[in-house]
Amino acid sequence: MKKEFTLAELVKKYGTKAQKASLKKNKGNLTGKEFTILLKSVDQEWESYTVEGRGSKRIITCRGKRSRKIERIDKRSNNGQGQLAGEYELNSLVVSFLVQNHNNVKPMSATKWLTELDIIDRKLTRAVYGAKDTHLEKLQEQFSKVIKGYNKLDSDIEMLEEFLHISLKSMKSSLVSVFNKLDKAKIIIYQKERWGCTTKNSYRKLTRNEVKEIASIRQILLNAYGLKSSDLFKTNKKEVKDFKKEFDKQLNEQLGLKFDYDAHFCVLQGSDLGIQEYLGRLQEKGELEFAHRLDELQTMITIEKLKDEHSRRSLELAKGRQQNKHNISDSHRVKCIKILNQYVPMWEQLLRYFGCVSNMKSNPVAREVKEPIVFDLGGIKIEIPEESKKTNPLALFEGIRFMNEVYSSK
């Protein structure tokens, strides 16, 4: 079964009172966030949908009417706990990092936080900010080995750019969400600031007027080159190259800066009891689950668990994007890859190449059932139950305590 809806018809059928009021207020249109929320309601009753057009002229084609309405995928429970892939692990890594650094960490970009926490491979950040040709050649060789019917093209760089953009954006978004949740739970004090790197390679917080001026320069140049902010990850596109060249020039000439970025500053909250005791009480209270006494080996395992959760979720989302073969924002090559049903297998290889998957023996991007997690440490295989991570923050490590003694004795 298939049915087409205009945006107005879709809001009338599935929208909330607030969305209907917003549609009327905004002359038949919704904001991006409101539209995303609306589509979650659509997903409860239809197996798939595609969106064509923009703004108020969007046409939404729904396919496969469900026999019964399903629960929302992002249903909220436990005060938001569990909505992020690997939220418990990310909470624990952030808190433990602050503890281990004696609650003295300078403001850093989200990307810098992710690398300092060892969550992302530096190969990924080098590909994001540097040349991509070498990575593309190695990836194409890998694609040829494992993907049936694959033919390499220079335009495969569009798929590489999409992966880098979506993956880094997703991990940064998860990190910032965790910062906000930890702040709300009174575990940390969190602030986001705007910083810049000067032409003399020093870093400093920007003034409010500087932030406004940079935003003005960026918007003027986006309009001049016919771009949107979401286009800027397409680094191989001529207009994007021209934009970046002119933006960097004006940033240098007008403000003496090489680049600007969001910096995230966190400190652990404490009390007269001290930070460790305070964290222990919050942990017992259980409003937000985390561990804060991770040693080196436990930190390594927590990172592996986080990669396991994140890569599995990333592949699930890639499967959804492959089904949407009429996304108007897709490049020509990405559209072709989706039509050939090669998008998902390529995504899986990209996850592996950039170290986004864990080193666990069970396949992190394909495992559907909850199996024991198997580690091979120095020829000794250890199994840890999947369910142990939240019932007891230390249960995950009980089976490998003796390995600490092995390492310390070396």
Image (cartoon, helix red, strand yellow):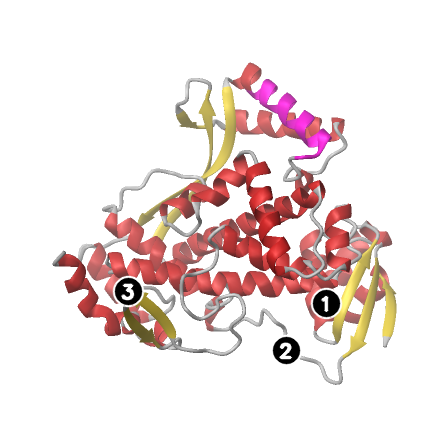
User: Compared with residue 357, is residue 208 higher up or lower down, i.e. above or below?
Assistant: above
Dot 3 and dot 1 residues touching (CB under 8 Å): no
Could you tell me which residue is drawn at 34 percent across and 64 percent down? 290
Asked if the residue under mark 1 is in contact with the one under mark 2, i.e. CB atoms within 8 Å, the reply is: no
Please name which of the two marks, 3 or 1, marks the residue nearer to the observer.
3
Judging depth in this view, the residue of 313 and 142 nearest the camera is: 142
Q: Disc 3 and disc 1: Cα gap in Å?
A: 53 Å
Residue 160 x %, y %: 62, 46
Q: Residue 377 carries which label?
A: 3
Who's the residue at 25% across and 74% down the image? 399
Q: Which mark is residue 291?
A: none
The quarter of the rendered structure image containing the C terminus is bottom left
Residue 299 forms part of the magenta stretch:
no
* Residue 132 appears in the picture as rendered: no
Closer to the camera in the image, 393 or 402: 402
The image shows residue 259 at horizontal and vertical percentages of 52, 27
Residue at the outermost bottom position: 67
Height in image: 22 above or below 248?
below
Residue flagged by tag 1: what amino acid is it?
Answer: Thr
Relative image position of residue 202 (x, y in whole percent): 39, 23
**Amino acid type for the residue under numbered disc 3:** Leu
Check disc 1: other Cα within 10 Å, few if <14, some if 14-19, many if 20+: some
- The magenta span reads 236-251
User: Mark 3: few, some, or many residues within 10 Å (few <14, many ≥20)?
Assistant: few
232 relative position to 274: left or right: right
Helix, strand or loop status at disc 3: strand
- What residue do we see at 25% from left, 66% from top? 281
Q: Which label lies toward us, 2 or 3?
A: 3
